[in-house]
Image (spheres, coloured by chain):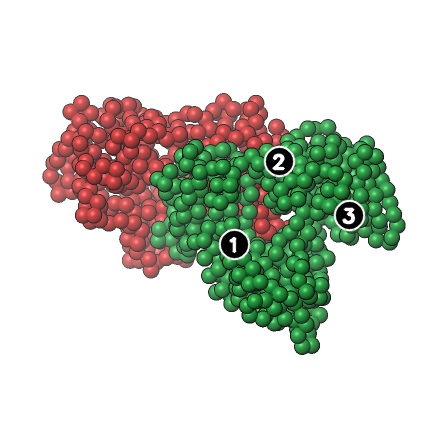
Chain colours: A red, B green
Amino acid sequence: MRFVVIGGDAAGMSAASRAKRNAPDIDVVVLEQTQDVSYSACGMPYTIADGRRQLDELVVRRAEVFRQKQGIDLRTGHCVEAIDPQAKQVSGITHEGQRFEIGFDRLLIATGASPMIPDLPGAALPAVKALKSLADGKAIQAWLAERTVQRAVILGMGYIALEMCEALRARGLAVDMIKPGPVLLPWLHPDLTAVVRQEVEANQVGIHLGRQLQRIEPAGEEGFKVLSDGPTLECELVLVAVGVAPNSQLAEKAGLQLGPQRSIHVDKGLMTSCEDIYSAGDCADAVHVVTGRDVWIPLALRANRAGWAVADNVTGRPVELPGVAGTAVFKVFDLQVARTGLNVSEAREAGFDPVETVIQSRSRAHAHPGASTIHVQMVADRRTGKLLGTQMVGREGVAHRINAPAVALHAGMTVADFIQCDLAYAPPFSPVWDPLLTAANQLIKAL
Amino acid sequence: MRFVVIGGDAAGMSAASRAKRNAPDIDVVVLEQTQDVSYSACGMPYTIADGRRQLDELVVRRAEVFRQKQGIDLRTGHCVEAIDPQAKQVSGITHEGQRFEIGFDRLLIATGASPMIPDLPGAALPAVKALKSLADGKAIQAWLAERTVQRAVILGMGYIALEMCEALRARGLAVDMIKPGPVLLPWLHPDLTAVVRQEVEANQVGIHLGRQLQRIEPAGEEGFKVLSDGPTLECELVLVAVGVAPNSQLAEKAGLQLGPQRSIHVDKGLMTSCEDIYSAGDCADAVHVVTGRDVWIPLALRANRAGWAVADNVTGRPVELPGVAGTAVFKVFDLQVARTGLNVSEAREAGFDPVETVIQSRSRAHAHPGASTIHVQMVADRRTGKLLGTQMVGREGVAHRINAPAVALHAGMTVADFIQCDLAYAPPFSPVWDPLLTAANQLIKAL
């Protein structure tokens, strides 16, 4: 039995390792186009924030370990160009230019996602960087080390943009962020977005919304200019962080069914539309536990979990994943921003009749020193009373608190159910009524 | 309609306020034996930790506000001595020595709990203090302010003992803790208890386990000695924190049914064994959501929630509370200690076949600076796979993380269900696999 994995990142290496653990006798081959496997991609902004740190610190397990200790036939520098589902074969070319073909009994497509690069004159200039692979991170770290970089412009304002904004400010750079859209974080409630914006601006970052980008061009000896219909932004580094797209080209060429946003469609057992071919990680879709619909939310936990599930399925331990709730958190300067489930417009689009509440509470008990404001948004369905989603912003106690409503979404709880949950209280950590319960109490009134 | 409330603390004042909000026309009378109502009792150790702070800062709402703005007939200094369920009347005596009688249509007994005082020679000495009421807190604060207090001995090692131990160390006192039992925190898994013990000892606190206390006696001019079958401990302050007992004497005398540990038994609608008489707060029992059995776990959130539920029930909005999961958290020095649900011995006693796992994970992602160890214990039922409880100890990310398994217990999730929950991940806040998921993954193997 040969199990071939395309892509040696979170989903791919999780699947390969677990398959070998489940069934040591099977032949596991991983084809990875870069030289890097198994690294903590999400940690890159925090490593770049510190000029003394090396990106290689983020490598969790080196290629040799997979090869020698785990018996995985890990082939780096192998770029797959085609999948033939009928012949059950993949083919491609190595970094050295050698063509290869390899047959499979089971295949996993774990090709991930790639940063979208806007179609902009100057987007290919060397000062224009994206951040997805470890090599991308190293290129940014080298760019900052090897020249005088005092100003950066970030195209985009998603969570990678915001994390990198914080990292570059930590390096002492002046930072401007620019995008065509009118709102900093369109998925976040406006009241909560205002808090994030205030935090970013308090850290001397320029925010330029609603600006059509025109081109990037060299300016002076080491400088560059980002031109838009607004101000011209000068800098020595341009970071493109306008979003990612699933690497589904191979799957599409092979005739596999695509899902939302051209992700690779899989069933709950992670199988694509073609038997014996699975997909997992940032390239694949998932079922949303609240809507029951297919959704593409590329996040690390799902990638790891789906990789494990594929391994179980190809080694004869059938498993299905119920799906994702879209739970996510990021840090931007001293703020924690978290969400789970649906916001109002997503809820409406999914056919719910959403009712929303937004409250402010405190991170610690009455009179306890050091408390700060926690902002909570909560949305439910008017017809059923079902909890649909929660968003939070605050200086402390947000990142882990979001997991309580996330579990409630998996359980299909109503707001009335959630209100009754026995949450932890001690003065250093929350008011007696946890901010989540205060939000739920308000929401039930609105229902 | 007259609604009489005995006890003006969390449950009592929550009930009185909400009853008046629900039905402004009813007559709400609160009989409180002290002069203090509506204060954050749990905040007292943190206030005492800072000699410049006043205990009155913990008062959330003053008596005048309840009287004048909310129209509650709040009578402080009123000590109820008897309840006559047949005549629907309570009677007692005021601080000024005047006898009173008052009839009720609905009655709430919210008499709380009192610290247990060991039957020990010298336990009545002025240097021996307990901490439950605001007056207790003021007495300790005054004792520390008015004389030279350099050493304290704490009898007991529960969470109030540990919080006060931290507070007194913050004031610069040398602190010893002593108790007859052999284990610091008997309800906590030994591995986790060891972590707590290490933290307490690292803060130069003497821990004396398995010591039978003999007596407390004066020593020198301002000093006292705590004598046991172990070392004699000298000090200028003795804090008694060996646990609390429900104030159920009034209820018992009135013939009401008692529950576990002589708490006042109530149904899910908070009604006692006598119609029209309710009980809520630290004096009343509750149903445990995992076992379905009556349990006495006096905690602040339940008190507030039960107070509200009583108000709803007496004002014609019938409501039942599903129960408690025993979720609790406390801070001791730089550690957070949290639990929800059952431990192994509680699970066994409740008729489950418990399987347990204990893991160590990290509070932040691989290679993220500042990470510390998180210890997670998780227990499930072998027969059904049902999650039964979780305990955690760590320097960060414990207090709010416990709420995720707490919600899972309310939802009746199996470990297999919980493993699939989409929890939040970002490098500053957790590994990709949250410590809770790592524990659940290990537990499922053990199942």
The quadrant the C terminus of chain A occupies is top right
For the question of whether residue B443 can be seen, the reply is yes
- Residues indicated by labels 3 and 1 sit on the same polypeptide chain: yes
- Residues indicated by labels 1 and 2 sit on the same polypeptide chain: no
How far across and how far down the image is residue B252, in percent?
A: 73, 42
Q: Are marks 3 and 1 in contact (CB under 8 Å)?
A: no
- Please identify, in this view, whether the residue under mark 3 or under mark 2 is nearer the observer: 3
The quadrant the N terminus of chain A occupies is top left
In this rendering, would B60 be left or right of A183? right
Extreme left residue here?
A: A98
What secondary structure is found at the residue carrying circle 2? helix
- Please identify, in this view, whether the residue under mark 3 or under mark 1 is nearer the observer: 1
- The correct choice, above or below, for B374 with respect to B145 in the image is above
Q: Which residue is mark 2?
A: A441
Tag 2: amino acid = Asn
- Residues indicated by labels 3 and 2 sit on the same polypeptide chain: no
- The correct choice, above or below, for A157 with respect to A443 in the image is below
